[in-house]
Image (spheres, rainbow, N blue to C red):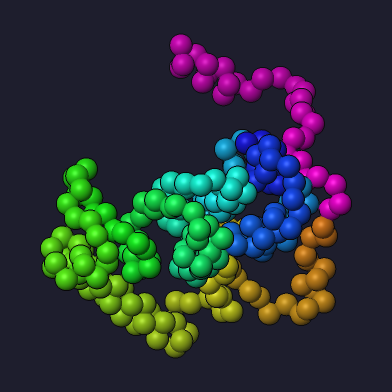
Amino acid sequence: MNATLKDNILFGKPYDHEKYQRIITACGLLPDIEILPAGSETEIGERGINLSGGQKQRVSLARSAYDDADIYLLDDPLSAVDAHVSRHLWNELIGPQGLLGSKTRILVTHGIHHLKEVDKVVVLKDGKVVEQGHYEELMGARLAFHQLICDYSVQHRSSSSASSIAADSDSDGSGAEDDTITGHEGSGSQGKNTKITNDSSEESTKKKPAKKDTKAELIAAEKAKAGGVNVSVYKAYVRAL
């Protein structure tokens, strides 16, 4: 909603500093808050227009965690985050050792790398339940779930080999940008590469925008343009008629 980042997480609940800090840490939001103009007081646009997909997902997770419900229905909350952020969210929030470890969690996901740690796996195909049980049980049955895991393993090995070949070619200096690494998913542009240049630390400090003490607002004063209407506007209007 169009409010500050903090208000989007609190969602009407009273503010508890210790609880708030614990949740934004578990949701991996600290790096994002640090780069926002006014931190937690930065204004968020309607439907999270100034947040990336991964940031919106993690703000939603933080809001849910702050609500302290008994049952959580999680609709693929790890789909828009990088692998290392996904692991962080699982370890610190969703998984058995996370903040929600004592809650009932129903997780819908296309990712299979966390399934060994869940209590029960339900396999859906064409809108119907075809298998259910513990990970080891379903693997032992060697049915649809076993085939799914095997297919994923083959695809994963193929993509890993392709990535390895690409990395080797990059190391030879062909087709790669200098000093480019995969950035943290929680940075300004989610899931993209963050380019790190060879600027000196002094120059980098100068380029880094200073934190504002006041709320970073999205709403700006309207500006009116003076003068005649361009002919192209009339032509567009006539064509629309």
Q: Nearer the viewer, residue 195 or 235?
A: 195
Q: Visible in this render: residue 80?
A: no
Q: Report the number of numbered marks.
A: 0
Depth check: give the residue in front, 19 or 166.
19
Residue at 36 percent of width and 77 percent of height: 163
The residue drawn where x is 20% and y is 65% is 138
Instruction: Determine the image quadrant of residue 19.
Output: bottom right
| Residue 220 visible at all | yes
Q: Which residue, as the protein is rendered here, is positioned at the far bottom?
A: 172
- Dominant SS type (magenta): loop
Residues drawn in magenta: 212-241
Task: Classify residue 83 by image quadrant.
Answer: bottom left
- Where residue 176 appears, as percent x and y from the top left, is 48, 77
Q: Tell me the quarter of the picture where residue 30 sits.
A: bottom right
Which residue is at the front of the view, 69 or 194?
A: 69
Q: Nearer the viewer, residue 133 or 35?
A: 133
Q: Is residue 92 left or right of residue 9?
A: left
Q: Is residue 229 magenta?
A: yes
Position of residue 131 relative to residue 203, above or below, is above
Residue visible at 77% across and 65% down?
A: 208
Task: Spot the residue most to the right.
Answer: 213
Instruction: Residue at 46%, 65% (x, y): give it.
Output: 96
- Residue that protrudes farthest toward the top in the picture: 241
Where residue 94 sits in the image (x, y, percent)? 49, 59
- Expressed as whole percent of the image width and height from the top left, the position of residue 62 reads 59, 51
Quadrant the N terminus occupies: top right
**54 lies above or below 11:** below
Magenta stretch: includes residue 127: no
Q: Is residue 73 left or right of residue 156?
A: right
Q: Residue 25, position in %: x, y? A: 64, 62
